[in-house]
Amino acid sequence: MKIRIKGNSLRYRLTKTDVEQFNRDGYVEETTTFGTQLFKYALQRSNAEVLTASFNNNTITMYMPATMANQWTCTDRVGYESNINSLYLLIEKDFKCLDNVAEDQSDNYPNPLAFKG
């Protein structure tokens, strides 16, 4: 899972394995170590009606409604977005880049633009 933050915009991109884990467990997280401190970001299934997010104890958690999560994990749907007050949230499946990059992309979804002529 990757996170991108820019201003009041928060985006998560999940690999195939991340999506499978989220579908199975209703929760997936990543951790980054900053010396003696940890920064975490997580996706959690919830009973809410829209995507929401919180920041507590050095952890950003995005909450995805169960109905939305079921549709997203079991179909070709790419993602969902939401605006909560001034915070823009986006959750999406991570596609393989069309450029050559050093990052391992073997667990990413096929990029639909790769098949267009």
Image (cartoon, helix red, strand yellow):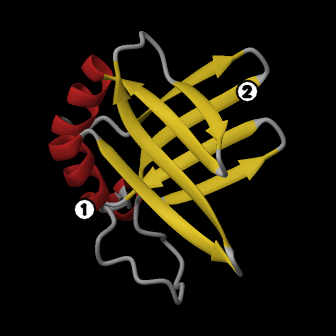
Q: Quadrant where the C terminus lies? A: bottom left
Circle 2 SS class: strand
Name the amino acid type tagged 1. Thr
Give the residue number, with chain letter if any, for mark 1: 17
In the rendered structure, the answer to whether residue 113 lies left or right of residue 86 reads left
Residue located at (28% from left, 22% from top) = 66
Above or below residue 77? Residue 68 is above
User: Can you tell which mark lies on residue 103?
Assistant: none
Considering only vertical position in the picture, is 94 above or below 33?
Answer: above
Q: Which residue is mark 2?
A: 87
> Which sits in the foreground, 5 or 114?
5
The answer to which quarter of the image holds residue 15 is: bottom left
Tell which circle, 1 or 2, labels the residue nearer the N-terminal end.
1
Residue 91 is situated, as x and y percent measured from the top left of the image, at 48, 39
Q: What residue appears at the point 28 percent right and 33 percent down from the top-left corner?
A: 72
Front position in the image: 116 or 20:
20
Crowdedness near tag 1: few (<14), some (14–19) or many (≥20) residues, C-alpha within 10 Å: few
Mark 1 and 2 residues: CB-CB less than 8 Å, in contact? no
Considering every residue shown, the one lying at the far right of the view is: 7
Q: Residue at x 42, y 55 (%)?
A: 29
Q: Is residue 95 left or right of residue 19?
A: right
From mark 1 to mark 2, how far is it between C-alphas? 27 Å
Residue 77 position (above or below residue 1)? above
Q: Nearer the viewer, residue 71 or 21?
A: 21
